[in-house]
Image (tube, rainbow, N blue to C red):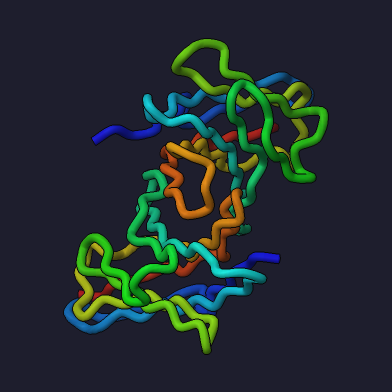
């Protein structure tokens, strides 16, 4: 069965410092993995996706994620947080339908 | 940039009433989906729809739920007799194909409150 686990429900960083949002997946075959972001009162916006091409995936707004099969991880990173990055982030595995993690709320302090 | 739209943004209804949530998917997409997120819980898959038929549904999607594409642009979710536990954010999504590698594009959601 396909599933994802987001290891942190809440991450708080200072503006200008790195961001790390952790996600582990479980899949019986080569997964398709996604990160979505949800700003308050907005829809779910795709940040990036992995579909078995390059293991390091670059997304929008300076985010990237690395697929590590040996660790069954797909962590989301950004070198320098911006205030506008404050939002809820979802790691998702596709199995036809999308299976969402519980979400990580990112807070960015000035 | 094309986007998925949903109306209304917030719907308040009395228990036992019927509600219809509306979505306009991206125009050249062929696959449509509904998800819901109960407050404080995960986003959960409800149903997928292709070629005017349900292609997959979860155990949440019982006989109280139905979906329809009444015309060439709208995609609706109907709840026949709402229960308190139906209170949630409902997201519509669409994709060009049904492949697992394909991106699903989500709308902003409809917040349903059942009193």
Question: Residue at horizontal 59%, vertical 29%?
Answer: B50
Which of the 4 image quarters holds residue B54? top right
Query: Which quadrant would the N terminus of chain A be assigned to in this image?
Result: bottom right
Q: Position of residue B58 (x, y in %)?
A: 74, 44
Query: In the shown orientation, is residue A94 left or right of residue B78?
Result: left
A39 up-or-down from A28: above or below: above
- x, y percent for residue A36: 41, 58
Residue A22, position in %: x, y?
Answer: 46, 79
- Residue at image x 39%, y 54%? A38
Residue B39 seen by the camera:
no
* Closer to the camera in the image, A18 or B68: B68
Front residue of A34/B102: it is B102
Q: Quadrant of residue A16?
A: bottom left
Reply above or below: A108 against B105: below
Instruction: Please name the residue shown 57% across and 18% down the image.
Output: B69
In the rendered image, is residue B109 in sight?
yes
Image-quadrant location for residue B70: top right
B13 to the left or right of A101: right
Q: Hey, which residue is sitting farthest top in the picture?
A: B71
């Amino acid at each position: 069965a396909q599933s994802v686990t987001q290891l942190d429900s809440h991450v708080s960083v200072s503006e200008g410092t790195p961001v790390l949002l952790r996600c582990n997946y479980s899949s019986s075959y080569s997964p398709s993995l996604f990160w979505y972001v949800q700003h308050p009162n907005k829809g779910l916006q795709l940040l990036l996706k992995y579909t078995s091409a390059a293991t390091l995936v670059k997304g929008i707004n300076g985010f990237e994620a690395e697929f590590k099969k040996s660790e069954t991880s797909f962590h989301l990173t950004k070198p320098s947080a911006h205030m506008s990055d404050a939002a809820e982030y979802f790691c998702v595995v596709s199995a036809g339908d999308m299976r969402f993690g519980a979400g990580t709320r990112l807070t960015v302090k000035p | 940039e094309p986007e998925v739209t949903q109306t209304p943004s917030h719907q308040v209804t009395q228990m036992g009433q019927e509600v219809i949530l509306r979505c306009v998917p991206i125009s050249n997409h062929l696959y449509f989906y509904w998800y819901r997120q109960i407050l404080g819980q995960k986003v959960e898959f409800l149903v997928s729809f292709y070629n005017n038929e349900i292609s997959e549904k979860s155990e949440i999607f019982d006989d109280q739920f139905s979906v329809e594409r009444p015309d060439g642009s709208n995609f609706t979710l109907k709840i026949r007799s709402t229960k308190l536990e139906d209170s949630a954010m409902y997201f519509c999504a669409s994709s060009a194909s049904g492949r697992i590698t394909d991106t699903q594009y989500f709308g902003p959601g409809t917040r349903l409150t059942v009193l």
